């Protein structure tokens, strides 16, 4: 029997250790009771360490190189990409998204499906949850897709209006990481125990499929403070809590990815989406050991998006993924393009600008010797070459992107 009700809960910047299941220092007793029957993924990876491309992978089942939103500041997706909101709406579902920062989704194909948590609130993080609860109540027995996006754990970690000296970055730089993390963990507890709890009270687990996850993690590490600076194991791996109405279902062991949620929902809803991506439905609990998944970072045009220069631009002026009024965005001199692949045991990261690479053990964060990166680069190239969406990549390719591709092919000995 098809599942007809889906709830997706995204917590911005949620690290793997920001749950009581993975970090007993976090005190979330009500949240723990309500999610005690949810499955926890041990190795769930995002496709990008940035909100816009990561969520676009969630809603399309595609990697950034396939859906076109290579980084946070890229303005649009490739044309012709199917997204979950439109797909389920066409199948008769009542769909809606509710975000504490809805403008982060501006210019994306699914933008119109995502509004504020509380339309009456000036600051969505301080707004009421009652409008969302009313939506859940009003849905009744109708097929539904609800997406919730919590922003309080992002960036300021609830520190707005609080003078903090030294800053969190200064604390980390001084070796006082645990002290800095207390502020972050406090924000994670606030969202789980005092906001999401009220949502989960409304959910009948016999009817709803629920997925709760981080769209990316956060640094708080001497190597990286902010998530958009570098692909890092604390940023790429995030928690996934999942529940399906099927009583005997279990999450597959092994390596899972954000792109897996799209085919999972399509299968549960019994919808043929003509999906040809790398995502693997989680309905099938066959172990995924040995599977390699991809994370991509592109900051060639910076990592900031939420500024008046973007948010006040009329839609028709966005003439390509990286152009306004046919004028290219200014390139970030410190920008980079990186990719990593992981099998849950190790993470291999390659910087296409500097040519440097790192092989790291996931469990300890310890760097491993890697004299020959060729096997990892071959796996990455196989993902690019094997994609069924390669025709989309020809859209709006910039001179910068062409140069990066040319250099990559030269490095691999193809040119």
Image (tube, rainbow, N blue to C red):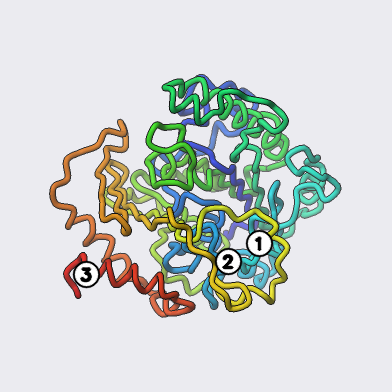
Percent of width and height locating residue 410: 22, 69
Is 114 rendered above or below residue 189?
Answer: below
Position of the N terminus, as image quadrant, is: bottom right
Q: Which mark is residue 334?
A: none
| Res 156 → quadrant | top right
170 or 113, which is in the foreground?
Answer: 170
- Left or right placement of residue 287 versus residue 115 in this view: left
- Left or right placement of residue 204 versus residue 285 in this view: right
Residue topped by disc 1 = 310
- Left or right placement of residue 126 versus residue 240 in this view: right
Is 338 rendered above or below residue 187?
Answer: below
Is 50 rendered above or below residue 36?
Answer: below
58 or 272, which is in the foreground?
Answer: 58
Position of the C terminus, as image quadrant, is: bottom left
Judged by depth in the image, the label closer to the viewer, 1 or 2, is: 1
- Identify the secondary structure beneath mark 1: helix
Sequence-wise, the earlier of marks 3 and 2 is: 2
Give the alpha-carbon distance from disc 3 to disc 1, as whole Å: 35 Å
**Is there CB contact under 8 Å for labels 1 and 2?**
yes
Residue topped by disc 2 = 75
């Amino acid at each position: 029997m098809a599942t007809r009700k889906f709830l997706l809960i995204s917590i911005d910047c949620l690290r793997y250790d920001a749950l009581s299941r993975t970090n007993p220092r976090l005190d979330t007793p009500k949240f723990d009771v309500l999610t005690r029957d949810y499955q926890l993924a041990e190795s769930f990876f995002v496709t990008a360490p940035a909100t816009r491309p990561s969520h676009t992978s969630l809603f399309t089942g595609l990697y950034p190189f396939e859906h076109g939103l290579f980084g946070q500041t890229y303005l649009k997706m490739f044309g012709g990409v199917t997204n979950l909101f439109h797909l389920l709406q066409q199948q008769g579902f009542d769909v809606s998204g509710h975000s504490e920062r809805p403008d982060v989704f501006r210019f994306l194909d699914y933008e119109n499906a995502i509004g504020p948590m509380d339309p009456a609130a000036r600051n969505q993080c301080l707004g009421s949850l009652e409008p969302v609860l009313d939506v859940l109540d009003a849905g009744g027995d109708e097929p539904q897709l609800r997406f919730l996006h919590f922003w309080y754990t992002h960036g300021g970690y609830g520190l707005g209006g609080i003078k903090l000296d030294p800053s969190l970055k200064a604390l980390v730089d001084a070796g006082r990481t645990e002290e800095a993390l207390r502020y972050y963990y406090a924000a994670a507890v606030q969202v789980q125990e005092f906001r999401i709890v009220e949502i989960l009270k409304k959910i009948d687990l016999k009817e709803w499929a629920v997925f709760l996850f981080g769209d990316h993690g956060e640094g708080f590490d001497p190597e990286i403070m902010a998530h958009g600076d570098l692909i890092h194991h604390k940023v790429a791996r995030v928690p996934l809590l999942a529940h399906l109405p099927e009583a005997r279902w279990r999450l597959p062991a092994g390596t899972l990815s954000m792109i897996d949620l799209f085919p999972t929902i399509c299968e549960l809803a019994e919808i043929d989406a003509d999906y040809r991506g790398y995502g693997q439905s989680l309905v099938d609990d066959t172990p995924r050991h040995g599977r390699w998944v991809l994370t991509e970072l592109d900051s060639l045009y910076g990592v900031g998006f939420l500024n008046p220069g973007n948010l006040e631009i009329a839609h028709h002026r966005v003439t390509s993924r990286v152009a306004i009024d046919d004028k290219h965005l200014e390139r970030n001199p410190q920008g980079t393009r990186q990719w990593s692949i992981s099998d849950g045991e190790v993470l291999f990261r390659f910087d296409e600008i500097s040519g440097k690479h790192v092989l790291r053990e996931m469990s300890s964060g310890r760097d491993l010797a890697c004299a020959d990166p060729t096997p990892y680069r071959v796996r990455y190239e196989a993902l690019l070459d094997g994609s069924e969406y390669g025709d989309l990549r020809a859209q709006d390719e910039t001179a910068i992107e062409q140069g990066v591709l040319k250099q990559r092919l030269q490095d691999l000995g193809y040119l």
